[in-house]
Amino acid sequence: MAQSAYIKFVTGSQVSALTLDELKEKLLHYRDQLSLTAKQLGWEYDEAGFPYTIETKPEGEGKWFYLKGINPLYKYIVIGVGSEKNQEEDRHYVQVVLPDDATHGDKSKGNEFCKYLGKLLKAELHLFNGRIMYFNPRK
């Protein structure tokens, strides 16, 4: 069965919603940061840190895209955006899905990307294992 992680935008989050294009930009920024780290270390870390290409399919247009692995240790991760009704307001989220045939590497990278986005956007992160991490300012 596929596993899902959610990055939920709550009170105190940096943004209240995110489009797919903005989400792609955040992932590309992450990849660029890895390449800068790679230059400093003198090691081609960017390929190991982000071993995916960003792919889209016509049926997922505007709803989701997927990261396709570039080596056999990684297959793919599906990423989409959505919203849910929470009491009287819409609460937007990013959903990261590991399909049934995803590898352990995909799960590790999925957790890594979720933590990065959660911290960057000051959101509430619901991990694949059901645990919750709070990056939003709470009192």
Image (tube, rainbow, N blue to C red):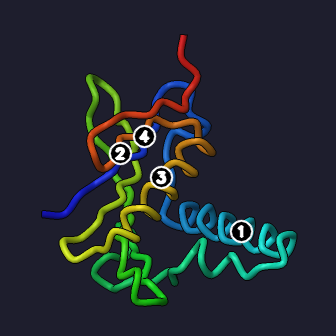
Tag 1's secondary structure? helix
Give the CA distance from mark 3 to mark 4.
Answer: 7 Å
User: Looking at the picture, which amino acid does disc 2 mark?
Assistant: Leu
Q: Earlier in the sequence, mark 1 or mark 3?
A: 1
Relative placement, left or right, of 37 versus 95 is right
Q: Which picture quadrant has residue 126?
A: top left
Q: Are marks 3 and 4 in contact (CB under 8 Å)?
A: yes
The answer to the question of whether label 4 and label 2 lie on touching residues, with beta carbons closer than 8 A, is yes
Q: CA distance from mark 3 to mark 2?
A: 8 Å
Q: Quadrant of the N terminus?
A: bottom left
Residue named by callout 3 = 114
Q: What residue did someone put label 1 on?
A: 34
> Where is the C terminus found, in terms of image quarters?
top right
User: Which of pointers 3 and 4 lies earlier in the amino acid sequence?
Assistant: 3
Give the class, few, some or many, for how many residues have Cα within 10 Å of label 2's Cα (few <14, many ≥20).
some
**Disc 4/disc 2 C-alpha distance (Å):** 6 Å
Asked if the residue at tag 2 contacts the one at tag 3, i.e. Cβ–Cβ closer than 8 Å, the answer is: yes
Instruction: Give neighbour class at mark 3: few <14, some 14-19, many 20+ (Cα, 10 Å).
Output: many
* Mark 1 Cα-neighbour bin, 10 Å: few <14, some 14–19, many ≥20: some
Between marks 1 and 2, how big is the CA–CA gap?
A: 23 Å
Circle 4: element type: strand
Q: Amino acid at mark 3?
A: Cys
Q: Nearer the viewer, mark 1 or mark 4?
A: 1
Around disc 4, counting alpha carbons within 10 Å, would you say few (fewer than 14), some (14 to 19), or many (20 or more)? many
**Residue 121 placement, left or right of 55:** right
Depth check: give the residue in front, 70 or 125: 70
Residue placed under numbered mark 2 in the picture: 127
